[in-house]
Image (cartoon, rainbow, N blue to C red):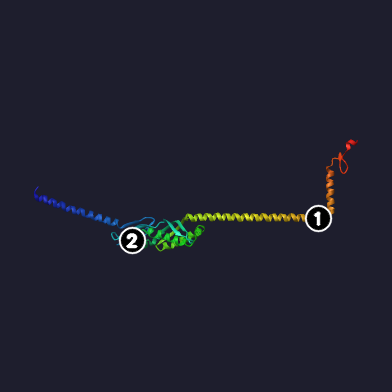
Amino acid sequence: MDLDNVVKMKFDSGGKAPRVLVPLVAGLILFFVAFNSIVIIQAGTRGIVLQLGAVQPLVLHEGFHFKIPFVQQIIPIDVRVGKAQSDQTASSKDLQTVNTTVAVNFHLVPEEVNKLYQNVGLAYEDRIVAPAIGEAVKAVTAQYTAEELISKRSEVSAKVKETLAAKLSTYFMALDEINITEFKFSAEYNNAIEQKQIAEQNALKARLDLQRIEVEAQQAIERAKAEAESLRLQKQEVTPELIELRKIEAQMKAIEKWDGKLPTVTGGANPFIDINKMK
């Protein structure tokens, strides 16, 4: 094989390689572009559209969507109900320290997630929700005494919910439910409450005992009055005729009981005489 034939073969093989690679590269580029033009928004989420870094007014709903490759970026954000729990320390109206645990259910307003992302970002729970819970609890707790926080718990919870809902709405979030698990006070206050309850129980017992004594005394007075009235009426009805009648009734009862035998011994002013010995 001479040199001219070798050079000719090399040029022929070199010409075929570009003709094969060009369509392949073009196909890969088209596939990559097409792949980056498609976005699927999952259930329970929304898509925030960034175009060259700028947040767009359009919010993508669940399902299949197109985007401009290399120009638009889609940020998925969860709009399902979420839970945040926070431990808070506040002061009551009577300056008692109150520790409470608050659990909150909330969700992002789906149509306004782009505004939330633009103003707050994705760390909205740490930046907005937790501080808002603390502010709402402190603002409402200061309106009630420690005792009222317990006795009016449902009212306190409703006010905290109203206050917190207003705060979250300014950041495009909606409050679903709030649950104040418990109010905890200092050991000194708990001891004072216990002593107060004991004192109230003792005072109540004393009042009940006094009422019982008063009732019993009144009952005794009424019984005495009734007995006195009965005696008075009986005294008014006693006459000489009634006395004679009672004597006759007594004699009749004695006769009914007599067995017909005379007594063997009689007595009186004279000495006792045995009648059997005189026979």
Which quadrant does the C terminus fall into? top right
| Residue for point 56% across, 55% down | 199
Farthest residue to the left: give it: 2
- For residue 49, the mark is 2
| Residue for point 66% across, 55% down | 215
User: What's the amino acid at mark 2?
Assistant: Val
Q: Residue 67: tell me if it is visible.
A: no
- The tag earlier along the polypeptide, 2 or 1, is 2
Seen from the viewer's position, the closer of residues 226 and 209 is: 209
**In screen coordinates, is 96 left or right of 111?**
right
How far apart in space, not on screen, are marks 2 and 1 (Cα)? 112 Å
Q: Residues within 10 Å of mark 2 (few under 14, many from 20)?
A: many
Which residue is label 1 attached to? 237
Q: Residues within 10 Å of mark 1 (few under 14, many from 20)?
A: few
Percent position of residue 161, x then y: 46, 60
SS type, badge 1: helix
**In screen coordinates, is 128 left or right of 265?**
left
**In screen coordinates, is 91 left or right of 122?**
right
SS type, badge 2: strand
**In screen coordinates, is 264 left or right of 12?**
right
In the image, residue 108 above or below residue 254 = below
